[in-house]
Image (cartoon, rainbow, N blue to C red):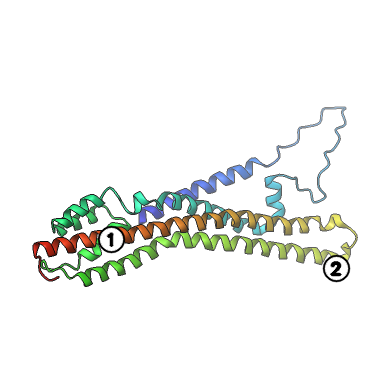
Amino acid sequence: MSRGMRLRLCLWGAVLALSVTAAVLAQQPPPPAAAPAGRVIEETVKPKGGVETSLWGMWVQGGWCMYPIGALSILAVALAIYGFRAYRSDRMLRSDLVPQLQEELANLNWENAKTLCQGSPCLLTNTLAAGLDRIKDGVLDVASMEKAMEEASVQETTAGMKPISYLSITAQLAPLWGLLGTVSGMIKAFQKIGLGGMGKPELLADNIGEAMITTAAGLLVAIPALFIYFYLKNRYLSIIAELSRILGNLSHTLVTASRRQGAGGV
């Protein structure tokens, strides 16, 4: 991932964090209006724990585990946006450059082809440029060039796979944090039972609510993140398969042209 893409990803994450924070704060109940003189206002019935059934109320009731789960949700959204923007065939393979590369290699102008690759860095051009670098003093060593492209493709595809791997890690960590919140809430509930809370469900409501809410929050983050992970992974694998086909065609064009014109060293 280039420095520019990392910067854009961080900016997206910051914007999403601000948006989520604003949405959560907007769920806070407004301050109660002052009662008119001489008029009795009936109190609104609230849950025993004093927490209202709203997004902010569930966030508060979920306890400290909601903060890492919220951070993971922001990270998952940022990685998903990056994945949908980056993992596209037109950006990673630059199909508009393929005819030009084909023409240059057919004319044995590998220096011009290398210049095209350096001017438009992407998965295809970076891999092809590594192979063209093995052409020294006009001597074309097919085996060495293909080996270089194979090594470069492994390096490029591994680097491109990292954001998808981070999305998978996010999908796995979110329910674990939710499970930790569940255990934390149940421990607090059992402590109250040990202090004489048996038979008084109102004393256990907050802790049981914490246990359930954190589990639900973790699953709400993990399920869509896991779905997007598999979708982006399949898309990336199809791009890799297309990359192999394009590189094979370009290599065949170069070898055929060199044999036709008697270029040395094949």
The one nearer the camera, 172 or 183, is: 172
Residue 247 disc label: 1
Q: Quadrant of the C terminus?
A: bottom left
Cα distance, mark 2 to mark 1?
A: 69 Å
Q: Is residue 162 left or right of residue 53?
A: left
Q: Amino acid at mark 1?
A: Leu
**Does residue 10 appear anywhere in the picture?**
no
Q: Is 258 left, or right, of 48 in this rendering?
A: left
Q: Quadrant of residue 137?
A: bottom left
Which residue is pictured at 17% across the width and 54% down the height? 104
Give the label on residue 194, or none. Answer: 2
Crowding around mark 2 (Cα neighbors within 10 Å: few <14, some 14 to 19, many 20+) is: few
Name the one closer to the observer, 217 or 32.
Answer: 217
Give the x, y percent position of residue 241: 37, 60
The answer to whether 217 appears left or right of 100 in the picture is: right
Q: Estimate the x, y position of residue 125 in percent, counting from the top left.
A: 27, 57
User: Which of labels 2 and 1 is toward the front?
Assistant: 1
Give residue 226's position: percent from left, percent from top: 56, 58
Q: Quadrant of residue 33 in the image?
A: top right
Identify the element where label 1 is drawn. helix
* Left or right position of 250 against 8: left
Q: Residue at x 16, y 56 (%)?
A: 106
Q: Position of residue 132 (x, y in %)?
A: 20, 64
Q: Amino acid at mark 2?
A: Gly
- Against 255, is 43 above or below? above
**Residue at 55% across / 55% down in the picture?**
227
Q: How busy is the neighbourhood of tag 1: few (under 14 within 10 Å), some, or many (20 plus)?
A: many
